[in-house]
Amino acid sequence: MNNNPLLSWQAMLIKLLVFGLVTVGLQTPVGSIAGKLSLEKKGFGLQSYDIRDNKVYVTASGPRGGAYDERGVWVNPDGSFRIDHLPKGEYSLKIHATGYSTEYKNGVFVDDGKVTELANEVSLYILKPSVQIASNRKVFTSKEQPYFWANCSGTKDLTVRLYKTDITSLLAKYHENSDAAQGDQSDRPFTIGNGLEMYKGSETRETTFFAKQTPVLVLERRVDTSGDDWSNAQFKLDKPLPCGDYVGLAEAKSANGEMDWNIFWFNVSDIGLIVKQDRQKMLFRAIDLNTLKPAGDVEIQFLGANGKRSYPPQAKGLRTGTDGFLASKTVDVENTDYLIMGTRDKSRTYGNLWTTGNSNSDTYKTYFYTERPVYRLGQTVFFKGMTRFLGNNGLRNPAKGVRISAVIEDPNNNKVWDGSYVTNAHGCWTGLYKVPEDGHTGGYQMTLTYPDGSKDYQSFEIAEYRKPEYEVSVKPVDDRVIAGTQIKARVKASYYFGAPVANARVKYTVYAANDWGGRYRLMPRPSYYSYFDDWDSDDDQSYQRSSYGGDYISEGTVQTDAAGEALIDIETKKLPTPGPNPYDSDYGDKKYTIEAEVTDLSRQSVVSSGVCSVVAGQFALFVDSTNYVAIAGKPISATVTACDYDGKPVAHQSTMLKLERSIWDQKTSSYVGRETAGQVMVTTDDQGKATATFDTKDSLPTDNYIITAASSDSLGNAIYDQSYIWIASENYPYIRTGDDAKKETLAIKLDKSVYKPGEIAHAMVTAPTSGKDGAEAIVAIEGTSLQKYWTVPMNATAKLVDIPILASYEPNVYVTVTFVGPGHQYYNQSRAIRVTPAEHFLNLTIQTDKEKYKPGEMVKYTVKAV
């Protein structure tokens, strides 16, 4: 016996605490939810409370706004259920049974000590079965175990049958453009598209199209849909399959025996095929998918949509060489569509279905423009077209006399005009269209039909116009302020008859966006760059990107005074201090847009806006290297330019230039610091420029580096700029391994924005590879034709590729990189190479014979081209 009084008191204290907790728990207000449910009977469409053959579960979630919890019960055989010990509050119910629709009941309230009975019984209906089957791979090698998955609902049992077949034999019957496909296609079980993808028919419920064939595998799976109406079943075969084409047929049955099915196919092959084509030639490259090395002796065949050989007439006519390449002239076959197939031993590989000859839509090109951007009802639209013929050597003037048919349709697709135009000696044509006073507003479409039957589409806009009774202007007091200071904007509203709009409500909203355009106008660059100003850019760092409306900053309301004016004060953010990350858009100049809606006493509203530039300081910095791609061990030159926002140079400005590498932590996926590879303090000259040279070391690893420029103005505002440069090193290549290699994207980075003929373009190609896979990339120069191609061994994650720039590349070509990587995944990327045609520029001057004229006099123009 324990006579220790301390232990006795401790035991008593524990008992008191336990009883206290139980008392608190018993005092918590609780209640219950009860209800009745029925299930649809198989084949009758009637409801029954007898659910002995089904498991139905009811879950209560809540209480809303309290300590969230879920409690559930199985429904009794007679369809009744009751969930007890629910704290007081509002609940949501989920009622689920496999093969039946899931029902939800919201807003069910539980009171203390009461049972909440559902007002109406819950009815669950048999789900119609649905199944989808797919894989993220179309090709597996004979050494890989094929895998796929199926998503299904309204079923407990899933069956997948695999049939070995010949996809070419299915083309004649099931290709969407085959003779057998013409007419009503609703009763066809499936169709095959131009990408050789299979689509299930819309009406048929039968799966008898493989009834006479024995499946190579039958896979059955019990589907678990206990948590939701949908379920996912993953399949991976136990062993590889022999080379060939395989169709997977998935079947799912509902609780009442109704069946749904779906279909997909995959190819087992040890070879792959890359196809490039222009108007004159075709290029094939066969790849061994197991080694990623070139595959020689692969026979190339052209099959029509009927699955029969179209070209060459004799077997063994076209075969790849030991380098895996085969170059052939473009083939004209009898069928409109043809399939390219490569075969070696028991392996087959397919391309997409191609269309014979040139694409009509690419035969002619028309540059179409109107004399104004928008028109009103009743006005006349004047337009002009410049048509060119696209041949093997590029665009050329189709000459005089080419007739182009045209149809104009209104926004409701009603034809409002048709006729034709004839090109003049310059390949141009003009026309006009009078918009009816009672016509429709919106976009009008013009369809052009060329002599070869190909079509082109142009458009113009008709807008409704209602002249407001007063005008509104929004003008910042200062057009430009420094970040961190206040913007003051004046809103002025006045009636057109001259009186101010007094005591009007002004609702304003402020947005901020990066002012790429403002910097682009100040940026130092060669004059011939302007030729490409209105071209779309694929450069992420391009200043030519158009700014969107901007991010929301603030909003508010003010009221106009007796003079119809109101003043708005807007706070701006000071630029942050740079950290380990590269400078991002937060450090750039901003464009604040102040949008004001003025509503007068008659409740008519007029909207206007004004723009204020928010800049880092009194001047801007621009830093740039001679090239965007450099070689480790060779000097790198960088130029910094300082100018104010009126474009005037800022002389004698001290600026620190650094060559840095941001350190990326792969574990945390964040930048953790910077390594400085070189730094130089420079002072700008009278033109606001300074140049520095960084002597790089051979030991620099291949990576993306940053050249930064940092300075400050007379007010102490910090001003920054940066430029990226890729430094390539043969001694320390850029290599990623494991998941990091898989996350790399196929990308092309050029060392300059615009090139001159005779220069060498340095392109850095990164790919999702560790460099140990043995893969090669095909690099090609393409434009209106496939001009050049070669292979680059991808023995690292990044490779430097040199491209000589030819005069024939003007004004642009595309460098494309095609790559079959690990897991025999296909990748393709392209990048425009811009080549200045400056030597072809004409300087035009237009002069009149005198400065002023009287009405009725003749004006004489003199146009000179140099």
Image: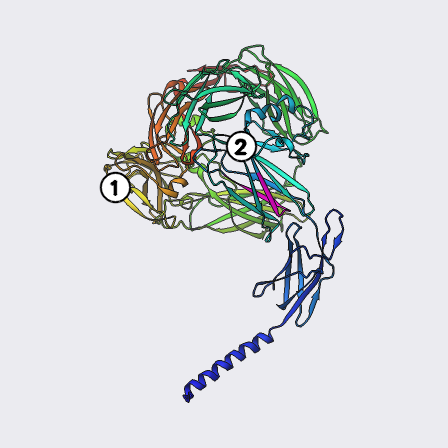
Magenta-colored stretch includes residue 39: no
**Crowd tier of the residue under label 1, counting other residues whose Cα lies within 10 Å: few below 14, some 14–19, many 20 or above:** some
Numbered disc 2: secondary structure: strand
Which mark identifies residue 678? 1
The quarter in which the C terminus is drawn is: top left
In the rendered view, tell whether residue 426 sits above or below residue 149.
Answer: above
Numbered disc 1: secondary structure: strand
Q: Position of residue 831 (x, y in %)?
A: 42, 29
Q: Position of residue 507 (x, y in %)?
A: 59, 49
Report the span colored magenta: 147-160
Circle 2 is placed at which residue position?
A: 246
Q: Position of residue 200 (x, y in %)?
A: 62, 34
What's under tag 1, amino acid-wise? Gly
Which mark identifies residue 300? none
Predominant SS along the magenta part: strand
Q: How many marks?
A: 2
The quarter in which the N terminus is drawn is: bottom left
What's under tag 2, amino acid-wise? Tyr
Between 411 and 31, which is closer to the camera in this rendering?
31
Q: Is residue 512 left or right of residue 433?
A: left
Instruction: Say if residue 265 shows up in the picture.
Output: yes
Instruction: Say if residue 388 shows up in the picture.
Output: no
The answer for how far apart the CA atoms under marks 1 and 2 are is 59 Å
Q: Residue at x 48, y 43 (%)?
A: 513
Q: Is residue 119 left or right of residue 268?
A: right
